Amino acid sequence: MSPTRKDFLNLSATGALGMGLGARPVAGHEAAGPVHGTTGTSSPERQEAPRRLDVLVLGGTGFIGPFQVRSALERGHSVTLFNRGSGRAMFPYLETIVGDRNGDYEGLRGRRWDVVIDNATNNTRWMELATEALQDATDQYVFVSSRSAYADVSRVPMTSEAPTWTFETADVPRDQERLPYGLGKAEMERIAQRALPGRATILRPGLIIGPGDETDRFTYWPVRIDRGGEILAPGNGTDPVQIIDVRDFTDFTVKLAEDATTGIFNCVGPRTPRPFAELLYGIRAVTTTEASFTWVPQDFLARFDVMPYREMPAWRPPTNGNEGFARFDLTPEVEAGLTFRSLADTATATLEYHYARPLERREAFRSGLSADREREVLAAWHAASG
C-alpha cells in the first residue's frame, strides 16, 4: 500500500529518503567557513494536486529519481518504482516492481498507470523495450532527454524547434552499437514519440544541479567559494549560464504530469540567462569566508588545458557555434508551470549536502581544478599580466 501524503512527509522529515536533504553542515565545517542554518533547503508544504495520479518511475534511485518520488508524493500521488531491486532499500514504504531494462518487464504485465516517468540514460534499446512494454499501459510517457539532443545550438534564442541530431548529421552509421550521447537521446525521443503518438512528454534539461548531485559539476563552485581566498574565474564574467536545480526540474516534471501536458520542453534556468559573474557572486553571498575572483580569459586558460565545462564547471562561453547554449527562450516552459528557486537556496542546499558527505568523498572532487592546478594557473596569469 502506498503511504499517505502525511505519512510521506513524516518519513521525509526523519531522513527516510537518505538524500541528506536539509541536513546541517557537519561539525568542524565552521572552521572552513560556515553555512548558517538551513535557509532554502526545505520548501513550504504544498497543496495536494487536484487529481490523484498513479505514477510509475523507471529507475527512481539515481540523482533525479528520488526527487521525482518526493515531489509526486508531496502532491498526493501514488508512486510505483521499476528497477532491479534498489528501490526497496531506498523506499521501503513504496511498491517496487523488480525487473531489468535489458528485457525483463514481466512484473509490469497487466498493470496500468496514469503516467510513466523514464529517466533512462543513453540506451536506445532500453527505450524500445520500455515503450513496447508500456505503450498500452499508460496515458502519458515522460522521457528525460537532454539539451545535448540539439544538433544546432547556435540559435539565439534557442527553442524546442531547433533541429536534433540524426545519424546523418552526426555522421554515425546506423548499425553503430553505442551512440554519441546527444544522438542517443535524440533517437530515444523519436522512439517514444513513435510508440506513444500524442502521449509523449520530452524534457530536455541542461546541467541539473543541487543537493544529491555526485558529478560535482556545480558543487565545485559553492565548495571552492566557501573555502575562500583567491579564486580562478573563467572569462570576463559576462558569459551567460542557464542550469536548473534538481528540485525545480522534478517539480516541473510532476506538474506536466498533473496537467497531462505533452510536447517538448527545455528545462534550464533562470528565465533570463544569468551572467557567470552573477552566478559566482550570488554563491559567495551565502558564505561567510573572504573570497575574491580573478577573471582569466578563455584563450589563456586554453594554453593551460583549462577547458570550459570540464575544468571550469557550468561555464560554456558562447563561441564556436555555442551561442544559444545558455540563451533559451523559456516562454512555453514558464507558461506550462516551470518555476525557479533562488540561487541562494540552491547554493546553500548544495553546500549542506556536500558537507554531509563522507570525508573521503568531500576530498575527491569529480569536476573542476585541484587546488595545486588553480594556484599554478593563477601564478602564470599574474606573471603574464604584470
Image: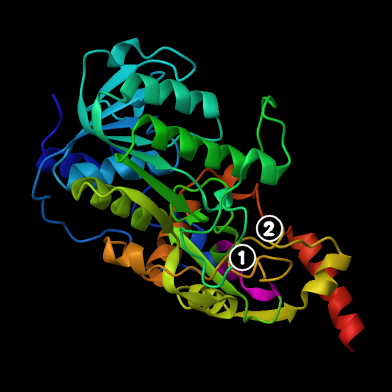
Confirm or deny contact between disc 1 and disc 2 (CB under 8 A). yes
* Crowd tier of the residue under label 2, counting other residues whose Cα lies within 10 Å: few below 14, some 14–19, many 20 or above: many
Query: Height in image: 193 above or below 251?
Result: above
Q: Nearer the viewer, residue 185 or 231?
A: 185
Name the element at disc 2. Answer: loop
The residue where tag 1 is placed is 224
Q: Please provide percent x and percent y for residue 293.
A: 66, 80
Which residue is labeled 2 in the image?
Answer: 368
Q: Residue at x 59, y 55 (%)?
A: 217
Q: Amino acid at mark 2?
A: Gly
Region in magenta: 223-234
Q: Residue at x 86, y 64 (%)?
A: 304
Q: Residue 291, can we see it? A: yes
In the picture shown, does residue 303 fall above or below 118? below
Residue nearer the viewer, 170 or 307: 170
In the image, is residue 373 part of the stretch drawn in magenta?
no
371 or 134: nearer the eye? 134
The outermost residue toward the bottom is: 386
Q: Residues within 10 Å of mark 1 (few under 14, many from 20)?
A: some
Instruction: Tally the marks.
Output: 2
Depth check, front residue: 281 or 259 = 259
Confirm whether residue 38 shows in the render. no
